[in-house]
Image: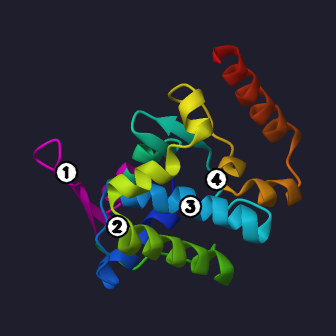
């Protein structure tokens, strides 16, 4: 499971520790979601290629648990689960991340979005930002197109794949049936 998403998680955890950013599970997951969308906007392609899906409490990278568990089992990070429901899950990097598969612009995108999520917003505020139209109309586990996190004017300029156009059309049609 040593792939771009695992390494992105490790990098964000490492940065948060090195720069003293308060990062729990929500901020880590939103940092990846925002980095994926920012990469789509700036580079016209996703950062890691992970699907973003509706989780019970917000949009999340698909199969994120497996990637974090792999990093933990590989001895690269430590995960400390909160004792109470409201306690924050925290992460500790146990080694420097391998960044060899990332371009400089990708590292910059992750650092900017990690800092934004950790320093500017609370976990609750981040959740409000990401619980938009598409998150509300789809079911848990369904994919949220990355374009849903961009300004509508930005989306008009992006070359969407046929699959993304179909997802957007289906989501809009599903909403009109419930209106």
Q: Quadrant of residue 11?
A: bottom left
**First of labels 2, 4 by sequence position:** 2
Q: Nearer the viewer, mark 3 or mark 1?
A: 3
Q: Earlier in the sequence, mark 1 or mark 2?
A: 2
Determine which residue is flagged by label 3. 34
Q: CA distance from mark 2 to mark 4?
A: 30 Å
| Among numbered discs 3 and 1, the one appearing first in the sequence | 3
Mark 4, Cα crowd under 10 Å, few <14 / some 14-19 / many 20+, is: many
Query: Residue at coordinates 52% horizontally, 59% vertically from top-left?
Result: 32
Residue with the mark numbered 2: 76
Circle 1 packing at 10 Å, graded few (<14), some (14-19), many (20+), is some
Find the distance from the CA under tag 1 to the CA under tag 4.
Answer: 29 Å
Dots 3 and 4: beta carbons under 8 Å?
Answer: yes
Residue closest to the eye, 68 or 142: 142
The magenta segment is 69-92
User: Residue 149 shows which numbered tag?
Assistant: 4
Residue 139's x, y, as percent? Answer: 54, 25
Between the C-alphas of marks 1 and 2, the distance is: 16 Å
Residue at 47% of width from left, 57% of height from top?
A: 30
């Amino acid at each position: 499971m040593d792939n771009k998403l695992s390494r992105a998680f490790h990098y964000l955890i490492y940065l948060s520790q090195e720069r003293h950013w308060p990062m729990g599970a929500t901020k880590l997951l939103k940092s990846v979601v925002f980095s994926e969308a920012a990469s789509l906007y700036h580079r016209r392609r996703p950062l890691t290629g992970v699907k973003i899906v509706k989780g019970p409490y917000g949009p999340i990278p698909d199969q994120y648990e497996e990637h974090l568990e792999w990093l933990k089992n590989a001895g690269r990070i430590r995960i400390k689960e909160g004792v109470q429901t409201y306690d924050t899950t925290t992460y500790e990097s146990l080694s420097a991340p391998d960044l060899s598969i990332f371009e400089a612009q990708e590292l910059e995108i992750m650092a900017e979005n990690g800092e934004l999520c950790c320093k500017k917003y609370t976990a609750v505020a981040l959740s409000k930002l990401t619980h938009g139209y598409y998150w509300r109309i789809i079911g848990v586990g369904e994919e949220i197109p990355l374009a849903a996190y961009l300004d509508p004017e930005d989306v008009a300029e992006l070359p969407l794949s046929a699959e993304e156009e179909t997802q957007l059309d289906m989501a809009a049609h599903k909403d009109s049936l419930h209106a």
